Amino acid sequence: QIEFIIKQFPSHDFCRVYACVILHARCLDLENFHTIFKFLEPREQHELVHRLGWLNVMNPLHPERVYVLDLRRYEDREMCKVLVKLAVSEPGANWNDEGYRWSIKDPYVPGWELPAEWASPDKDDGGPRRFGRLRLRYTSDK
């Protein structure tokens, strides 16, 4: 039903995003909320994630998409931890086109790949870094 309502709104001025935010609290099947993304333009998807957060819009059973994460933000860092755990537990190469840069002004580090220490617990300098920008396309082999 949310999909039908979203389609009725124009894309300018983030009208569809406003509708998604309002309807999110009324959604009975939040496990399917991630399907809304296919009806939104990339700029609208970015705004929806900004307003609701990755952990409210993402379904770990269907993680396939492009992620751009600011590791200084708690929500984005937690999302990174989820993606790391999924990558470790699922077979195959799940992180594709990944890139890391120290800040938004820096270029992406050439040849960067997921460090093994990011899969360790979050204490004693383990887990993902607490700074930098991460970009990746997550895919699952099914």
Image (cartoon, helix red, strand yellow):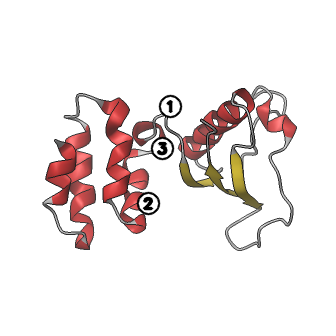
Q: Amino acid at mark 2?
A: His
**Crowd around label 2: few <14 · some 14–19 · many ≥20 (10 Å):** some
Image depth: mark 1 or mark 3 in front: 1
Q: Amino acid at mark 3?
A: Trp
Q: Compared with residue 117, is residue 139 higher up or lower down, i.e. above or below?
A: below
Residue under label 3: 54
Disc on the earlier residue, 1 or 3: 3
Residue nearest the observer in this picture, 66 or 17 = 66
- Rendered location of residue 111, percent (x, y): 86, 61
Is 25 positioned to the left or the right of 87 in the image? Answer: left
Task: Name the residue located 76 percent from the left edge and 45 percent from the top edge.
Answer: 129
Task: Name the residue located 77 percent from the left edge and 62 percent from the top edge.
Answer: 102
Q: Is residue 105 visible?
A: yes
C-alpha separation, residue under disc 1 versus residue under disc 3: 14 Å
Residue under label 1: 61
Q: Amino acid at mark 1?
A: Leu
- Label 1 sits on a secondary structure element that is loop
**Crowd around label 3: few <14 · some 14–19 · many ≥20 (10 Å):** some
Disc on the earlier residue, 2 or 3: 2
Residue under label 2: 46
C-alpha separation, residue under disc 2 versus residue under disc 1: 20 Å
- Label 3 sits on a secondary structure element that is helix
